[in-house]
Amino acid sequence: MNDVSSAVAELANDFSGRLFLPADAPWDEARRVHNGLVDKRPAVIAQCAGSADIARAVRFARERGLEIAVRGGGHNVGGRATVEGGLMIDLAAMRHVYVDPVAHTARAAGGTLWGQFNRETQAHGLATTGGVVSSTGVGGLTLGGGLGWLMPKYGMALDNLVSVEMVLADGRIVRAADAENADLFWAVRGGGGNFGVASSFEFRLHEVGPMVTGGLIAWPIDRARDMLRHFRELTARADDNLMLVAALITGPDATTRLCAIGAGFFGPAGDGERALAPIKAFGPPAMDAMGPIPYTQLNSMLDGSYPRGTRYYWKSRFVDQLDDGAIDAMVDVFMKCPSPRGQVLIEHFHGAAARVAPERTAYALRQSGFNVLLLSQWDAPAQDAAGTAWARDSYGALAQCIGTRRYLNYFDNDDADAHALDAAYGGNLRRLQSIKAKYDPDNVFHLNVNVTPKA
């Protein structure tokens, strides 16, 4: 550690941000990520002020033989934003957004959170597809896909990228876009953090809000099977203006189990009530918070359900059709959930996000269907075994009625083998490996769902 300390002292002479060692007061807070189940201790945290700092930190880590983790928002459920005994590149000081309301674009620094991004773009009545929890990082969500309320109308977050500034494994700073390093631009749109550190993102914006129609409505759990069949019928009729999610949850009293539908409507303002009326027609609700709502509030209404420091373990799979057998199995596993924080989420994929050819970007999950997420969460370390076991057992129980495709951003820390890569990338994996060999031949950036380099 003394050798690292002296080297860090020397690095400080060529660094604009802040450097934290374990003995420094800010280190303990800076090392923590959203998932309280993850408790890693970096040897050094480099809180970068800009791209030059990132490049210097990458070179420093390589010179010292330190593994590199990159933290944007720190939401990755597998804890890939931190590292044991290595260097964490922390982008928390790089959180700013510049909006061009004439060109309908916005540039966000690498550590920006979606709540900050939405606040700035909504000041101009503009938005792009982004995270449904406002403390999620722009970078991690976008590089792995980027589902959000706007994806039926405007595609995934990565479909709205215009360019990305990247710091590569050799410390070079490059721009990736359709006409510049086009192979890298293809790869980072879905390839996660495999190719370098994204220091900024340029997005295409669309006219949205500031008021939209949406929210959440819930019914007693004994109506869950009928509600999910109703949800299936609603999704079959949904157009590009409507995003729908179903959930099996426990209410705020931590006792009452509920089934719920979340929705966002982004068509003509006067059509919102009519568009959401079929949801409410299901019957008298236990809770109804669906109606006119600011777009920024729609994107933060779930924040309280996923607090920082809670312990999380996730499993997910994609299914083309939500048949009765799958519905029965989802309700059955939810009723066995040991924690009131646990959930089963069913996210409908359709519209613009499903009309892109799978080979157009590295992100390959392009068909219409349903992403089923078993979201296990709990508070106390004593519940760790039960929390992880419920998700794993439920995942096994659903294996016969859900598909093989998977959404990269929901991979937990044990989802990194060849089967997981095939499930995420399909036919795009070989091309990703070739691009990895070009830009990161030594696999410097491997603390991710790792694509190994193959020429």
Image: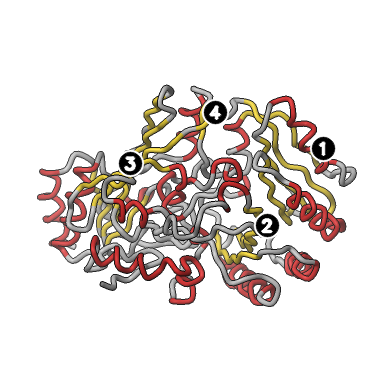
| Among the two numbered marks 3 and 1 on one chain, the one whose residue lies closer to the N terminus | 3
Q: Check disc 4 and report the residue beneath it.
A: 207
Foreground disc of the pair 4, 2: 4
Report the amino acid beneath label 1: Ala
How far apart marks 3 and 4 lie (CA) works out to 22 Å
**Measured along the vertical axis of the image, is residue 236 above or below residue 331?**
above
For the residues marked 4 and 1, what is the alpha-carbon distance in whole angstroms? 24 Å
Q: Which residue is identified by label 1?
A: 277
Say whether residue 233 is visible.
Answer: yes
Residue found at x 35% / y 64% = 447
- Tell me if mark 4 has few (under 14), some (14-19) or many (20+) residues whose alpha carbon lies within 10 angstroms of its own: some
* Residue hosting label 3: 200
- Image quadrant in which the C terminus is located: bottom left
In the depicted view, which residue is nearer to us: 96 or 195?
195
Structural distance between the alpha carbons of marks 3 and 1: 40 Å
Q: Do the residues labelled 4 and 2 touch (CB within 8 Å)?
A: no
Percent coordinates x, y for residue 175 in the rendering: 26, 45
Check residue 346 in the rendering and tell me which mark sits there, or answer none.
Answer: 2
SS for callout 4: strand
In the image: residue 257, left or right of residue 46:
right
Amino acid marked by disc 3: Ser
Q: In this view, does 212 lie to the left or right of 85?
A: right
Q: In which quarter of the image is residue 367?
A: bottom right
Image spot of residue 117 (x, y percent): 46, 34
